[in-house]
Image (tube, rainbow, N blue to C red):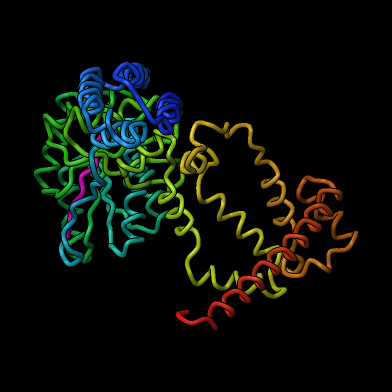
Amino acid sequence: MLEKVTNALGDVVRRFAGKSTISEKNIEEAVEEIKMALLEADVNLRVVRRFVNATIEEAKGEKVLRAVDPGQQFVKIVHDRLVALLGDSRQDLKLKGPDTLSVVLFLGLQGSGKTTSAAKLALRLAKQGRKPLLAACDLARPAAVEQLSILGERVGVPVYKEDSKDPVRVAKGALQAARKGNYDVLIVDTAGRMQADEALMDEILAVKKAVDPVETVLVADAMTGQNAVEIAKAFDEKVSLTGVILTKFDSDARGGAALSLKSVTGKPILFVGTGEKVEDLEPFYPERLAGRILGMGDVVSLVEKAQETIDAAEAEKLQKKMAGESFSLQDMLDQLERVNKMGSIQSMLEMIPGLAGQVDAGAIDTSGLKTQKAIIQSMTLKERSNHLIIGPSRRKRIAKGSGTSVAEVNKLIKQFEKTRQTMRKFAKNRGMQAKMMGGMPGF
């Protein structure tokens, strides 16, 4: 997502960051490059004009031209303007307290990822300690109710459904069930159409009146660019939105929707869908995305992703295994799985300062990790816990089961033994350093 605009703006930032002097001509040329990059990213024309005018006006002031470090000052202005464009600060769902029911109404066109996003949000809220209930009120699309039921089962959240053709009746039934079951969030999945017609709007308005939501959220497809912005405007005029979820944010979309939505509609982007898995829903942070666009990375999000896959207790347990000799092939497999859960290589590269747009994720060979996983998964639990028992006959069986060769199995086991030795030395050195520090005054 936003690869072209990231490359273009990143180039401008790298040229200016170290400059000790800049002129009005330098600024005009840089802003012109930024303008073209935004237009190519399908950003709304009026939004681009406002962005360019505000940037030039601020950058040509004495604050920049006479600054001690004018290059960095200019970069900061571009960053701040981008943040303002994206929505200033993080906006979350405004839910009531856990003892009071909050209704979140989901709406959007067919194919936007509305039903899947409803399940993703339910999972996210459940992880935060909430007690959500999903309501299947999309009675127009064939199999929509079944899809939500399957997703609800996958994320461990119950789904309310009725054998009815009346979405208002189902919505009212879901509201009663939520109150009776002491649920604190009801997520209502409504019908979609191929276009925002009057019949769709009337149905959504009727459902909205029946459930009185605290949040009315549009789910829009980032790949549709400016169409997503126009769709948001149409829905907001009829139904009054409170926020937007942008799906397919991990795609190769140009990014015009993300960069235009807040300025054009006044409605914040609450979350972005970053993949097909039920865990792939992330809060939208304007400042972090601005940093990624300018090639500054997003270390905070990268750390948060890592923290989601391993907690403190697991980390401590792993460290103890590393210090001793109990680190096994099963532990190695667990670590490979955690890396996979953190997302695509491309998304992680974009979060590392200086690497966004500089490294082609397609050039990174991840096949080795898949091969390693396949080999370990072809072992028995006993073999994973004690690799020393894996003799020649077992290695032949493992190679056959994983679709690899005995040489590749041998290579993995040698690599594992070397890794285990290195980890053990590292863990012991850390332990010695901690003891030494502990003996010093003030520690």
Q: Quadrant of residue 146?
A: top left
- Residue 191 visible at all: no
Query: In the current view of this chain or complex, which residue is farthest to the left?
Result: 209
Q: Position of residue 160 (x, y in %)?
A: 27, 53
Question: Does residue 44 sit above or below 283 in this rendering?
Answer: above
- Residue 272 visible at all: yes
Q: Position of residue 96 (x, y in %)?
A: 16, 59
Q: Quadrant of residue 178?
A: bottom left
Name the residue: 71% across, 51% down: 372
The N terminus sits in image quarter = top left
Q: Position of residue 410 (x, y in %)?
A: 84, 54
317 relative position to 294: left or right: right
Q: Is 7 in front, or is 74? A: 74
In reply to whether residue 103 is colored magenta, the answer given is yes
User: How many numbered marks does the figure carry?
Assistant: 0
Q: Which residues are magenta?
A: 101-108
Q: Position of residue 173 (x, y in %)?
A: 18, 53
Name the residue: 14% across, 25% down: 198
Name the residue: 37% across, 47% down: 282
Question: Does residue 56 sit above or below 287 in this rendering?
Answer: above
Q: Is 51 in front, or is 360? A: 51
The prevailing secondary structure element of the residues shown in magenta is strand
In reply to whether residue 194 is colored magenta, the answer given is no
